[in-house]
Image: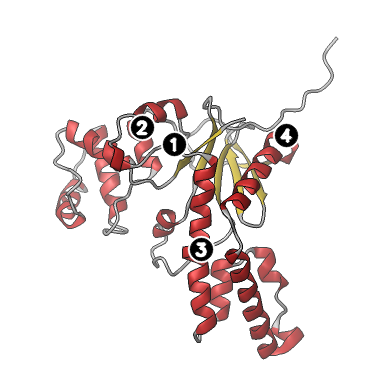
Amino acid sequence: MKYAFVREYNLSYDFFLARYFQDAGILFDDKTIYSELAPRLAFASGMKSMSAEERLFYAYGSSWRMHPEVRPTYYYLFDRIVGGKGRPNVKTLRELERRLPADKGKLVFSMGEAAAAITEFYRKQVRSPLRRGIGEETDEDDLIVRFFTYNEIHAIPGVRAVGEQGRKEAIRKAIQNLVLRIDSLTDETVDAEIRQLLEEHRTADTSHLRVGNKLHGSKTVGDKTWSCSHSSEWIKISGFGESENVDLMLEPTRGFENGAYDPRHEWNYIAFPMYYVAEEDNDMIKPKIETGPEST
């Protein structure tokens, strides 16, 4: 089975967003900077009615305010101009991808490309600050919160068991161990884990899905949600939806709350490699549905 991966944050979306705004008569191009846009957003905030294009432009600019140095090219914004409903349509994206100039990247990624991006994230955004933490006087507890998984954190002995110095030494050894593991991490290792977890989800029956109540105020049909989570050492695949046909997201298991990026939470969505997962025929991956005995 062949899978396609669509990144949550992708600068390639801006090629289409800019043209969408221009076609609606909105002054905007790839040279526009946030400081030029800010006064227009302040004016728009007082408008009583806006067109669909203006509403999207306002949402784009409001998101950009959180990180003026980088454009807010999120899939959820791009999805609104391609007729999507929150889940990527691989066929549509491949057709659009043909219109992208050669220097504007791509919209759909292979499993190998997603694996390579996650490996690079670990090397640059996780290993580097951990190495600095080993060589400097750093708050070790801050490092483990940012870069360790829940199980790894709880495996570190507490102060009552080994004393304050003993806990610090245990944390330092755990950090050194994680750095060594990232040193040996390869694209092939991440690729294999992605394949393993996708197969785990595909072959599982629906009993592995957790059923919960929908958030108060939701305008969608129904009052239940379905979710699941599959984790390995380096990656996590999470499912969420309003039926048993959950949408899947791929991401690293650690590093999302890396304060080294920026104290503004939204920046994490830019630096963190998150991907929607779909089959090439565009059906989001479905778990196996158990069927009872046939009626007679």
Q: Are marks 2 and 3 in contact (CB under 8 Å)?
A: no
Residue at the spot of label 3: 123
Residue at the spot of label 4: 203
Q: Amino acid at mark 1?
A: Val
Residue at the spot of label 1: 108
Sequence-earlier tag: 3 or 1: 1
Q: Where does the C terminus fall, quadrant-wise? A: top right
Of the two numbered discs 4 and 2 in the rendering, the one whose residue sits closer to the viewer: 2
Q: Are marks 1 and 2 in contact (CB under 8 Å)?
A: yes
Answer yes or no: is residue 251 visible: yes
Residue at the top extreme?
A: 296
Inter-mark Cα distance, 4 to 3: 32 Å
**Residue at position x 14%, y 34% in the image:** 25
Q: Where does the N terminus fall, quadrant-wise? A: top right
Sequence-earlier tag: 1 or 2: 2
* Mark 1 residue element: loop
Residue at the spot of label 2: 97
